[in-house]
Every structure is written in structure tokens, then in C-alpha cells.
Amino acid sequence: MDRVRVSQDYLVFCAGHFMIFPNGSEPLHGHNYRVAVTLEGPLQDDMVMDFVALKRLVKALVDELDHRVLLPAEHPRLRLTIREDQVEAEIDAKRYLFPTEDVRILPIPNTSAEWLARYLAAQLRARLPSNLRLHALEVEVEESFGQSAVYREVIDAAAATP
């Protein structure tokens, strides 16, 4: 099985978030996240996928999150009220008010590196060329040096045979 991996200095996004724990939440803070993507599959036209095309896809994804506050849409204790120009987020006794343009509400239950990796994998999978025969897709989200989460998804075991 062949693999390609992209991990460039420009595949980063700076974003604010807070984690919601069973007994509270942490303060609003931010990270300079780095993203790496690995695709595994058979060679097609002498490659798994063109590096330039893959880097463009990943760059577009990280740009959507860059310089935004990331909020999870699916956490049962987080109440989001979306108005035309504001997003209000309430968790326990905390209340945040953000300009709508500064927020990305993501279809995940929390904004951990693990859930961000899953989110980015799903977004990338939806944007990959339909003729790509992949066996697996892996997304790594590093939130600080030496601290990262990896999500690996087996897409099609049959793609392993050329």
C-alpha cells in the first residue's frame, strides 16, 4: 500500500476555543494548530494523489477555521443563540457574545483536537476527487508542540487491490 503525507508550515490555523468537561469548562483560549494529512491507497497515474492538489484542499480547510472562535454545535450543555450579527454561547454560568463573522459553529460535540481531526477528515473526504481509490485517510491536528490527536478512517478496504 502506498501513502502520501502533507505537513506544511502553512497548513495551520489560529483559533480560539474552550473545552467543556463533565464538571465545568475551561477558559476561552487559543492555539496555533498545525494539520497533517495522510492518504493511503493504490497508485493511479503513478501517484496516490497529486501533492499540489492535496495541499490546496487542506489549505482551504484550515483557512475556513483560521482566526475564528470554534464552537461545538452538538454539546448538550452548550446553548447557542444565533442572531444576524451575533452568536451567544452559554455554558454553565459563563456567557460569551461573539460577532457572527468571527465564529465557526462545527457539527461536533466538543472542540478537542480529537474532534477537530474528525471534523477535518470528514470535510476533506467530501472534497476529494470522486475517482480517487483510497484505502484510508488520516488527519493529525497538533494544538501545541508535541501534543496532537490523530484520526484515521478506513474508507475502502477493496481499494487496497490495484
Image: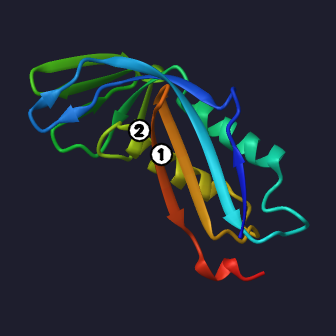
Classify residue 160 by image quadrant: bottom right
Classify residue 61 by image quadrant: top right
Q: Residue at x 78, y 81 (%)?
A: 162
**For residue 54, side relative to residue 26 (left or right):** right
Q: Measured from the top left, where is residue 18 in percent x and y?
A: 30, 26
7 up-or-down from 10: above or below: below
**For residue 112, side relative to residue 61 (left or right):** left
28 up-or-down from 65: above or below: above
The answer to the question of whether label 1 and label 2 lie on touching residues, with beta carbons closer than 8 A, is: yes
Q: Measured from the top left, where is residue 81 in percent x and y?
A: 26, 30
Residue of label 1: 117
**For residue 27, side relative to residue 86 (left or right):** left
* Residue type at tag 1: Ala
Q: Say what secondary structure mark 1 lies in.
A: helix
Q: Residue at x 67, y 38 (%)?
A: 7
Q: Residue at x 39, y 45 (%)?
A: 115
* Residue toward you, 9 or 122: 9
Q: Residue at x 17, y 35 (%)?
A: 21
Q: Measured from the top left, where is residue 9 in percent x and y?
A: 69, 27
Residue 113 - label: 2
Distance of mark 1 from mark 2, alpha carbons? 6 Å
Q: Measured from the top left, where is residue 122 in percent x and y?
A: 52, 55
* Residue toward you, 160 or 125: 160
48 up-or-down from 17: above or below: below
* Residue type at tag 2: Ala
**Badge 1, how many Cα within 10 Å: few under 14, some, many 20+?**
many
Number of dots carrying numbers: 2
Residue placed furthest toward the right:
45
